[in-house]
Image (spheres, grey):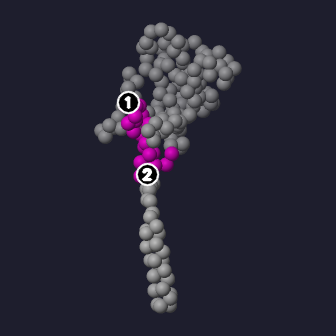
């Protein structure tokens, strides 16, 4: 989970649940992947605690990247991705829905829940500069300065003279 793309982190860095395939689901749970339900969007994750964490209406709520009904990521007026709250039935959240057909699914993919507590400090949602249209976690902290200075012997001698002069001044002043 979490790879670097041009200095930014991919969104899966803060996925609440891992991205799965039918094979990885079977390996992780020991159960065959459930049959695809065309009335629900493809869902490449599942919440193993959804049924026990459901509210009184049988729903669970997650923070996800904001999307419209077609599954297109939404953006702020500053053209940045943002989050929204997604409330779905716990029965849906508790199982993945892997699309295995040869035609395009008719429903948008169910967004991945995000673990906002795992968001690295100083990072914000942004669009990748390396892979356009891909949301990333962008580090807003300025990079630490780097220096590449080649000191000559004359530079070294000048610094040593300044240190010597400073020591002499302190001796005269009594510091």
Q: In this view, does 125 lie above or below 86?
A: below
Say which residue label 2 marks.
143
Tag shown at residue 151: none
Could you tell me residue 64's position as x and y percent?
46, 33
Residue 36 in which image quadrant? top right
Residue 104 visible in the displayed image: yes
Could you tell me residue 52's position as x and y percent?
63, 30
* Tag nearer the camera, 1 or 2: 2
Indicate the secondary structure of the residue bearing disc 1.
loop
Range of residues picked out in magenta:
120-142
Residue 57 visible in the displayed image: no
Could you tell me residue 20's position as x and y percent?
57, 24
Could you tell me residue 95's position as x and y percent?
58, 22
Direction from residue 126 to residue 100 in the image, left or right = right
Residue 77 in which image quadrant? top left
Q: Which residue is drawn at 46% across and 72% down?
A: 157
Q: Which of 123 and 98 is in front in this view?
A: 123
Label whose residue precedes the other's in the sequence (1 or 2): 1
Q: Nearer the viewer, residue 3 or 94?
A: 3
Say which residue label 1 marks.
133
Q: Residue at x 65, y 15 (%)?
A: 32
> Does the segment drawn in magenta span residue 113?
no
Q: How crowded is mark 1: few (under 14 residues within 10 Å), some or many (20 or more)?
A: few
């Amino acid at each position: 989970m979490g790879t670097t793309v041009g200095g930014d982190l991919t969104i899966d860095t803060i996925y609440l649940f891992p991205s799965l395939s039918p094979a990885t689901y079977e390996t992780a749970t020991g159960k065959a992947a459930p049959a695809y339900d065309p009335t629900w969007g493809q869902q490449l994750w599942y919440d193993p605690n959804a049924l026990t964490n459901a509210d009184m209406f049988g729903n669970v709520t997650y923070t996800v990247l904001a999307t419209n009904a077609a599954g297109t990521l939404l953006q702020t007026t500053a053209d940045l991705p943002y989050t929204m709250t997604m409330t779905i039935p716990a029965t849906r959240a508790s199982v993945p829905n892997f699309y295995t057909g040869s035609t395009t699914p008719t429903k948008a993919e169910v967004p991945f829940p995000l673990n906002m507590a795992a968001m690295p400090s100083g990072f914000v949602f942004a669009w990748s500069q390396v892979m356009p249209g891909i949301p990333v976690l962008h580090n807003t902290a300025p990079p630490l300065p780097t220096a590449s200075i080649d000191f000559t012997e004359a530079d070294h001698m000048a610094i040593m003279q300044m240190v010597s002069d400073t020591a002499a001044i302190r001796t005269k002043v009594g510091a």
